[in-house]
Amino acid sequence: KKQIQTWFAEKNREEKNEGQSPYFGIGKNKNLIFIQVESFQAFVLNQKVNGQEITPFLNRIVKDGMYFSNIYPQTVEGNSSDAELLTQTSLYPVKQGATFFRFPNNTYHSLAKLLREKGYHTFAIHGDEETFWNRNMVYPHLGFEKFYAIDDLKQDDIIGMGLSDKSTFRQSLPILEKADQPFYSLIITLTSHVPFTIPEDEQSLSLPKELENTPIGNYLQSIRYMDESIALFIKGLEERGLLDDSIIVIYGDHDGLFQKDKGEVEKWLKREISDEEWVRSFMQIPFIIYHPGMEPKIIDTIGGQIDILPTVADLMGIEKEKTYYMMGKNLLLQEDGKAVIPKGDYADEGILITRDKITPLPENYPDLTVADLVIRSDYFKDKKK
Ligand code: GP9
């Protein structure tokens, strides 16, 4: 307990004079829609294949919104569910196993709970079985009042593991339209899951011969499908008059192509990529905040998924004292930043990424150890804050 208390006290002492960003509260009382995108890496943005933009819609959103260009995935053995933990609670996952399976009934401080205190209605939507990653058990503890999973939706278009993204988004629109406002909705996509297989009539990219039916070709094709799904969703929000009253947050859950797959990306770009360049330029996931008419901004501060909640909390006008137990930083107030990558899919030993260096992490690196202790001891059980 002492170790946990000291870590948070020190972090909050450091942040004492930071104040709030100039964007504090721009989302106050607006709906908040999080879109967690399966296997979405930032290197596909603003890129072309065979002369075609891979993500034409998201390129526009990136240009018109607030784009964080240097954000790292920090998931461990819980993959997508770890991304949910990181972004909803600003805690690192436990070092071993999936936090959602090991500690489903913990008390968590979360975005949905903070927004509920402000009168928001909260729900999550995902086109897979509700039990996948134990989400049906964990979501109530993350503050979601309702979870619409595949059995709550019409199973009219199945791709890969579950309901297609186009169908999930199409069916989300009436749910959002009927919801009492303001609401907070977490929508989790699925179709761009490995092995990235998209039915032929949904493949919009015309790929060069050498990329057809390859992992990279399929990846790009599935990312284009996801781009189209989000475009239709945002258009639907606009048609229903919901877009002006909503803040949209889009981010990747984890990588789809890892360092071990860099040969695939090399095949596409027709050049070699060093291990260091992979970490500096290919491993990142996108983090985008969009609202029509907002002042566009690119922020290249280094950060991770752990920082998404404190950053969004600032925009939503959540008071500083409510962020005491968030392990991440408000990216709008950092200049250089850092990303802690736990041992796992991204790095054999865990790494610390800063502007100047990429260094190995010691096994007992404090941030990861403290998160592990918080979760394993259910530390927040008796804490109101
Ligand atoms: C499953 C989906 C994918 O519902 O979120 O999970 P992953 O295999 O990427 O962890």
Image (cartoon, helix red, strand yellow):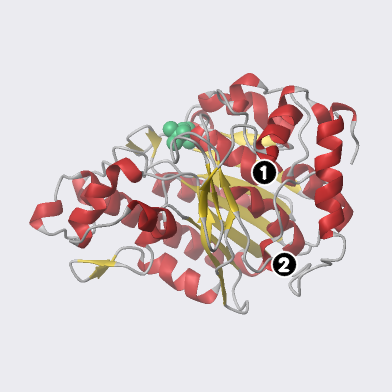
Closer to viewer: mark 1 or mark 2: 2
Q: Residue at x 89, y 53 (%)?
A: 321
**Amino acid type, mark 1:** Gln
Marking on residue 333: 2
Expressed as whole percent of the image width and height from the top left, the position of residue 18 reads 82, 66
- From this viewpoint, is residue 202 visible? no
Looking at the image, which residue sits at the far left? 209
Expressed as whole percent of the image width and height from the top left, the position of residue 216 reads 24, 49
User: Which residue occupies the foreground of this view, 46 or 117?
Assistant: 46
Circle 1 is placed at which residue position? 88
**Is 26 above or below relative to 213?**
below
Expressed as whole percent of the image width and height from the top left, the position of residue 205 reads 22, 59
Asked whether, in this view, residue 143 is left or right of residue 162, the answer is right
Find numbered disc 1 in the image and state the secondary structure of the residue it sits on: helix
Marking on residue 215: none
Q: Residue at x 70, y 34 (%)?
A: 371
**Is 68 above or below relative to 60?**
above
Expressed as whole percent of the image width and height from the top left, the position of residue 129 reads 49, 27
Asked whether, in this view, residue 306 is left or right of residue 207, the answer is right
Q: Quadrant of residue 291?
A: bottom right
